[in-house]
Image (cartoon, rainbow, N blue to C red):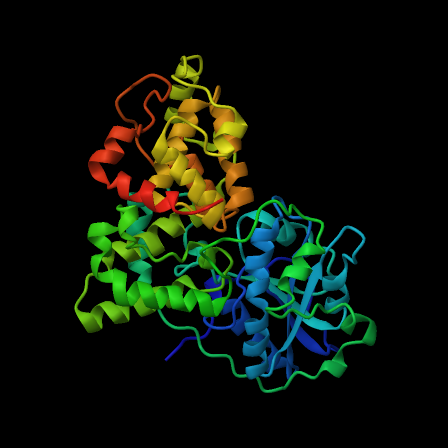
Amino acid sequence: MGVAVEPSRIRALNQTPMREDAKYVLYWSQMNRRVESNHALAYAAQVANERRVPLLVYEGLTYSYRGANDRIHTFVLEGVPETGTSLRRIHAGYFFYLRARRSSPNDVLYRLAADATCVITDDYPVFIASDHNRSVPEKIGVSYIAVDSSCVVPMSVHQKQAYAAFSIRPKIHAELPKYLTAVVPVRLKRRWADNLLPAELKNLRTKVTQANIPRLVAECEINHSVKPSISFTGGALAAKKHLDVFLDKRLSRYAGDKNQPSKHATSDLSAYLHFGQISSLDVALKARAHAKKHRLMDGEFLEELIVRRELSFNFARFSPSVESLEVLPDWCRRTMAKHASDKRPKIYSREQLETGQTGDPLWNAAQKELLLRGTIHGYYRMYWGKKVIEWTRTYEEARRLLIEFHDVYALDGRDPNTYANVLWLFGLHDRPWFERPVFGQLRYMSLEGMRRKTDTAAYIEEIAAYRI
């Protein structure tokens, strides 16, 4: 049995009242691109039912976001046909618009909002959705409401930025009984009818099929040099398949093997969670049910899925910046200032790093995985990032490159986890360690340590089989 959308998930971002003489409620799906287990969609349906109007879901994809390329565009577009099918099943309307180039119209949302009771969207603390949620509410001309469906425990439950996992963990665990509950399935009282849209708007709607995605991507003014992932296909159905594999074959060994990349014990859900094609709440509920049924331990997985992930959202929600080294704790900035002029053991150019041409075979393999698959196993990603600090002239250069590589190549980039994990490399959510050159008191990771703790040879061999 599900629950209604909790008030703690809902934020009105302007003071404009709801429109009385409206044709529909408009849900702008910016980050949670799914139908199931979506608090924002559920709240939009609730308002539509209260107002006795149908529900229209608007989803857009533009050429102009930072790092726009074939990989990210393809992954998003692959989820569009099944989203349309799922929305038709619940009698909601669906308007997908691909803004392919600068000359394409850039006012579709505003034109749709002109006939809407209100606009409901996703509450998300970073990237383009965060920018939209700052700039659009005062220009939209109608009530604009953001709903948090990214976190199990809503971001608003926390009143300040947590210092580390140990400080947020007790709060999350105390709130889990209240929030670890399924979302009420959407039931709409009024069916959507396309005649509610004027003809000139209908003509702007982009028809997406699995067959025409390559053509649509090719027509966009984006970076065409970054090809789609060789391992991950976008969409809710693909996400569910990864989850099923994880539950059936990996959860039982997750605790012991999660830091062994060659053993493939992790969920492979990070890209789907980032694009909202699967809900962390739904994943948690299914993991807990599976673990209970099969008498497995799910604690370490839920620690990563909920506590660690939501620590990143907490950081993004309360930090004045998610990319700057200036937001790091004082001890981090002091130790970097002290060691800024330390001689680096090796300096690699941007091109050498981007193409994986260093003297470190494990690092090269991790970079190759990023280039081809669009992700790196989390444990090796920490090592990968630490070496960039060691191999660049300044901490700022390292930070910039790490974020740029995520922006361009990572399917799970541009995410609270991305920014928190990059800044973790420089001490965020960590503690001081023994002092050493370059890193000062920042945590250090070595190739020798990786060889002791993981089967690096198996991983390097696996990645070597991939062809660029």
Q: In this view, does 451 lie to the left or right of 308?
A: left
Q: Which residue is drawn at 24% across and 31% down?
A: 449
- The number of numbered discs placed on residues in the rendered structure image is 0
Q: In this view, does 59 lie to the left or right of 359?
A: right
* Residue toward you, 432 or 290: 290
Q: Where is residue 39 in the image (x, y as percent from the top left)?
A: 49, 68
Quarter residue 231 falls in: bottom left
Is 275 placed above or below 288 here? above
Is residue 163 at all visible to an observer of this figure?
Answer: no
Q: Is residue 12 left or right of residue 17?
A: left
* Residue toward you, 399 or 3: 399
Q: Residue at x 57, y 78 (%)?
A: 85
Is 77 placed above or below 338 here? below
Q: Position of residue 52 (x, y in %)?
A: 64, 84
Q: Residue at x 54, y 71 (%)?
A: 41
Q: Where is residue 311 in the image (x, y as percent from the top left)?
A: 38, 47
Q: Position of residue 251 (x, y in %)?
A: 25, 61
